[in-house]
Image (spheres, coloured by chain):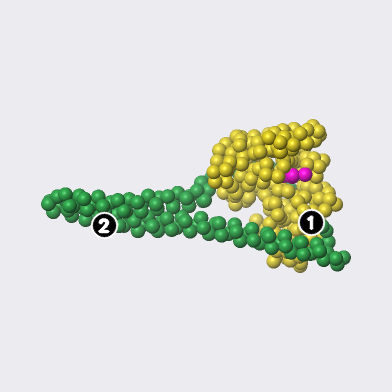
Amino acid sequence: MTDPILSARGLRAAYGPIEVLHGIDIDVPTGAVMAILGPNGAGKSTLLSVLAGLHPASGGEVTLAGRRVNGARADVLARAGLCLVPEGRGVFPNLTVQEHLRMVTHSGRRLSDIEAETYARFPRLAERRTQVAGTMSGGEQQMLALARGLATDPAILMLDELSMGLAPIIVEELYAQVVSIAASGVSIVVVEQFARAVLGVADVAAVLTHGEVAMVGPPAELEAHLSTAYLGAIVP
Amino acid sequence: MHEQPDRVEQFKADIADMKITDPSASRDQLVARIGWVAMGAGLVLPLAAYLMSHGTTNPLAQRDAIILALLGVALAVVGGALYLRGALAGFLRFWLVRDLHERRVQTDRLLDARSEDPSPDAGAP
């Protein structure tokens, strides 16, 4: 493990008067897969939004590659290589697979190159290339969202609830891709409510409860304490 | 994937070169607040000018009061425009979020309908 490529120190965030993150400290090592786990409402998605610059931090700091980036615009961070695949996939239901991929050509890459890489990684998208995303299955939509993110050549990829609403076999297939993406050197942050989906692929994991980091460590160590942490989050 | 070995170094360089400004949402709030203050000042200034003009028989001071009152009117107009700009930006941003949310709900509805379709091409899940 090397220096963290992404860090949060004492990170706080609120929706109006309601604070949902109460001082988060996390480090994402360069080239590693970090899992952020926690029960519903723990603040996992808010944490990703703040890290991606979509939601303002009300306190603390976010550092990317050693530089404080609080207040940086989300599009500037995305252009630099911080890519968020949001919960609910964020695909456009009326656009085809090909049109989604064409959207990413703003980065200066040719559509044919993007398509070749995408279809090599996700052969199922090649079969659906002229189909509108709204009529594809949830797994195919998630593949498309992932492919679109990868086409931007990210240095850090943040995945929010990749497994949400998907069949276990599709989840397994998607996480196999995550492992292969990580092997190519991309640092990955995965947010998951259901820990077992991700613990096998993560190098390090953090458990969030009530907007605070309850535990951080290797997945194997955390797995044994997960139930306690989740129950601790429910029972006051 | 087209990960180059120096992708992380490139990322670090991009982050180091990045110009970080305040988020536009808080800028809109600031503009709206400045608008409020300017409108408030625009109301107070003519009142002060009236009291100033009424309390003296000196024509020079009364002309100053007229100028002060006109300045107040100008401040109120500019403040109103600034408030409208800030408030509209906030409203349109909210509208955009609402539109995105509705699109997502519509997508989920389509998926639900498709998952009920028993045809073999329905796919998972």
User: Residue B23: which disc?
Assistant: none
Residues A67 and B28: in front is B28
Q: Are marks 2 and 1 in contact (CB under 8 Å)?
A: no
Picture coordinates of residue B64 (x, y %)? 20, 52
The kind of residue tagged 2 is: Leu
| Residue A139 - label | 1
Label 2: which secondary element: helix
Report which quarter residue A106 is drawn in.
bottom right
* Same chain, labels 2 and 1: no
Q: Residues within 10 Å of mark 1 (few under 14, many from 20)?
A: many
| Residue drawn at (45%, 49%) of the image | B30
Span shown in magenta = A190-194
In the image, residue A47 sits, relative to residue A124, either above or below, namely: above
Circle 1: residue type: Gly
User: Seen from this angle, which residue lies furthest front?
Assistant: A236
**Quarter of the figure with residue A32:** top right
* Outermost residue, right side: B120
From the top left corner, tell me how far across and down residue A115 is, in percent: 75, 60
Residue that carries the numbered disc 2 in the rendered image: B70
In this rendering, position of residue A11 left or right of residue A230: left
Q: Colour of chain A?
A: yellow
Q: Residue drawn at (78%, 47%), measured in percent from left and top? A: A178
Q: Nearer the viewer, residue B104 or B2?
A: B104
Give the color of chain B as drawn.
Answer: green
